[in-house]
Image (tube, coloured by chain):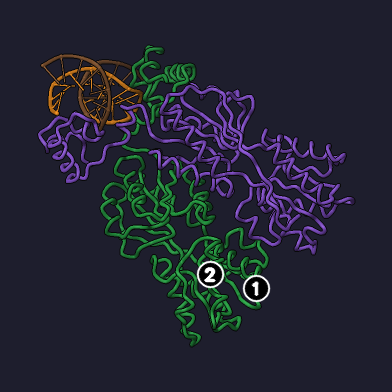
Chain colours: A green, B purple, C brown, D orange
DNA sequence: CTGAAAGCGCTTACAG
DNA sequence: CTGAAAGCGCTTACAG
């Protein structure tokens, strides 16, 4: 690759001037600017990004940490984020923690090693006390998942309300034995959702049967397993609130396989409003998360922080969740 | 951030020795090694990656260019690739071209700007003549999509055979009026699939009605639109071979909405064997692509090329495709 | 408007 | 086994 020196040599100008042209500085003679531009073109010159980063102390790159790229929720979030990032002149680096604490830690190191200007945590594996030391090295914000101990800016959804909305809907449909498969304590997001579930149940004077609480799972296979457990219960639930549409879809699929009618024999409620929810039969009643808005806002906030050299302090933007009624309930 | 100099100062050793410890060189006194390690720990030292890259002329990073991350095909491909890359000590950068030539070109520039050691093209927007000049700057390989003019290593699937397999299956089910919605000429991959369709039709002495050929589309909405077109035909097809499972799912969804029975009134065949294909009702008969194997192999090949300083020459590994029979045909 | 010089933080021959 | 020096390719005060 040609270097700035070669461009300088070819034009008879100094590297400084060439650099000024590259960086669009004012105060470069229009004529000389033209000459430099042509020389760069001819030599196929492109600035070496490592050198720029080393010298300029910025990378124009943002890392996003998620926990599972094959989850459509995350791929749509990434899609939305990338869109804004590109518009703002930033590159996005996708980091998949695969729910692994050590991997997340390695990915946070990108900030220390100066590979990125900031990190958006769309999932959260480590505790705040572990993450906190990294905030010294650049902006970190939460988007989607969160930890209320964390002194970080957050762009999140009102999960408690989501849990409440879904549960109340099931109750309104006449259900009294309601299973909950969103998990109760893995992370704060699931805890808050569960609190919404609790609130709705309490409001309706319904008891929560601990036998009907399932850990939070992600995939289709998990949904199938949950149905298998339900089918073998002496007192099965009449409705189930799943932790995500994929889980809901797995439950429905397996239910149909075993000649259960949805929603008559078992009502199923999802979460996320993924494209999938509308595709399967019956369509999944679900809680819509404003993914695009959340991703967009998180990147905007991050760019702002990087540019303004914001220090990282607590702030919280909460977006609303809404119920989408379909045929599975 | 602490620098190598500070570590050196703290230990009373030279930066050279510290560097040797960082890079696990032999010939460092075991004792001193220990001292350096402790100092790094205490200072929270992490090497600046831009400096390393600039000096070492390598990034240990590979870019993968895809055309649409929300396509489950690509998110699963990325997932498989990331898995191997991490194991081999490489970082993966996800580049979404969004089917845009200019964006793809910018992403190819990552090689020139030395941000990555190599590029895996999982989709292809530009012609070979446009891509060719970039091969001077580092290894580029094709994975999934391809261009047979390209003098590049490729890891691909036998698309012609896939098109043939699916079509023959529909013919065996007794269909004679078969629609094809995989596109006929956008890219070589779709062209080859279409050639398989043609071969099967010809073998069975069936005519291809041009009115039943649809461009290649991607999403659920496209599937719905296709069904709308079919429903308004005087001589509608009895079966349709879609370009992907999402399109097939869209067709099926819309068909059911209009009281069409699948497969009795319209048989639908997909492509990819995405999780979706098994979830919806009826399950989608589809052509399975060995995504994991393809992604794994591509990264292995790339790592090999980077390490061995392979020059980029033509080579081709073709993986087999197979028919998965479900209820939609 | 322009250029010489210093320096970002590393690693790699080279010499010992 | 160890260190001084050069240099990777840029950009940014500084001086003019």
Pointer 2 indicates a residue of which chain? A
- Looking at the image, is A9 positioned above or below residue A109? above
Picture disc at residue A262? 1
Q: Residue at 35% of width from left, 26% of height from top?
A: B57
The one nearer the camera, A173 or B24, is B24
State how far apart marks 1 and 2 are (Cα). 15 Å
Marks 1 and 2 belong to one chain: yes
Residue A11 lies, in percent from the top left, at 40, 13
Classify residue B201 by image quadrant.
Answer: top right
- Looking at the image, is B236 positioned above or below residue B201? below
Q: Is residue A24 visible?
A: no
The one nearer the camera, B144 or B233, is B144
Q: Is residue B81 left or right of residue A325?
A: left
Q: Is residue A196 visible?
A: yes
Q: Is residue D7 left or right of residue B216?
A: left
Residue that sits furthest to the right in the current view: B234
* Circle 2 residues within 10 Å: few <14, some 14–19, many ≥20: many
* Circle 1 residues within 10 Å: few <14, some 14–19, many ≥20: many
Front tag of 1 and 2: 2
Question: Which of the image's four quarters has the C terminus of chain A?
Answer: bottom right
Residue B107 lies, in percent from the top left, at 50, 34
Q: Mark 2 points at which residue?
A: A226
Pointer 1 indicates a residue of which chain? A
* Dot 1: element: loop
Residue B317 lies, in percent from the top left, at 58, 32
The one nearer the camera, A123 or B86, is B86
Residue A307 lies, in percent from the top left, at 36, 44
């Amino acid at each position: 690759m040609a270097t700035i020196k070669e461009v300088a040599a070819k034009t008879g100008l100094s590297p400084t001037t060439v650099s000024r042209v590259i960086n669009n500085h004012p105060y470069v003679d229009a004529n000389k600017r033209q000459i430099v531009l042509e020389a760069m073109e001819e030599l196929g010159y492109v600035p070496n990004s490592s050198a720029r980063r080393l010298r300029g102390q910025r990378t124009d790159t943002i890392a996003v940490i998620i926990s599972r790229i094959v989850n459509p929720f995350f791929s749509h979030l990434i899609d939305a984020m990338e869109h804004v990032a590109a518009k703002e002149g930033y590159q996005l680096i996708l980091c998949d923690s695969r729910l692994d604490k050590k991997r997340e830690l390695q990915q946070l190191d990108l900030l220390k090693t100066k590979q990125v200007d900031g990190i958006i945590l769309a999932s959260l594996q480590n505790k705040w006390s572990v993450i906190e030391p990294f905030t010294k090295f650049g902006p970190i914000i939460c988007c989607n998942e969160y930890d209320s101990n964390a002194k970080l800016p957050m762009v999140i959804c009102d999960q408690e309300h989501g849990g409440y909305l879904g549960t109340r809907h099931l109750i309104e449909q006449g259900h009294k034995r309601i299973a909950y498969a969103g998990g109760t304590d893995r992370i704060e997001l699931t805890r808050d959702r569960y609190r919404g579930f609790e609130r709705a149940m309490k409001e309706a004077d319904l008891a929560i049967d601990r036998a009907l609480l399932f850990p939070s799972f992600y995939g289709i296979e998990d949904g199938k397993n949950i149905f298998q457990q339900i089918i073998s219960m002496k007192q099965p639930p009449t409705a189930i609130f799943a932790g995500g549409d994929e889980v809901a879809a797995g439950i429905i699929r397996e239910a149909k396989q075993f000649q259960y009618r949805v929603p008559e024999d078992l009502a199923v409620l999802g979460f996320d409003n993924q494209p999938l929810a509308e595709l399967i039969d019956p369509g999944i009643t679900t809680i819509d998360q404003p993914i695009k808005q959340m991703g967009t806002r998180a990147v905007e906030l991050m760019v702002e922080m990087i540019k303004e050299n914001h220090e990282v302090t607590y702030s919280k933007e909460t977006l609303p969740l809404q119920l989408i009624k379909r045929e599975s309930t």
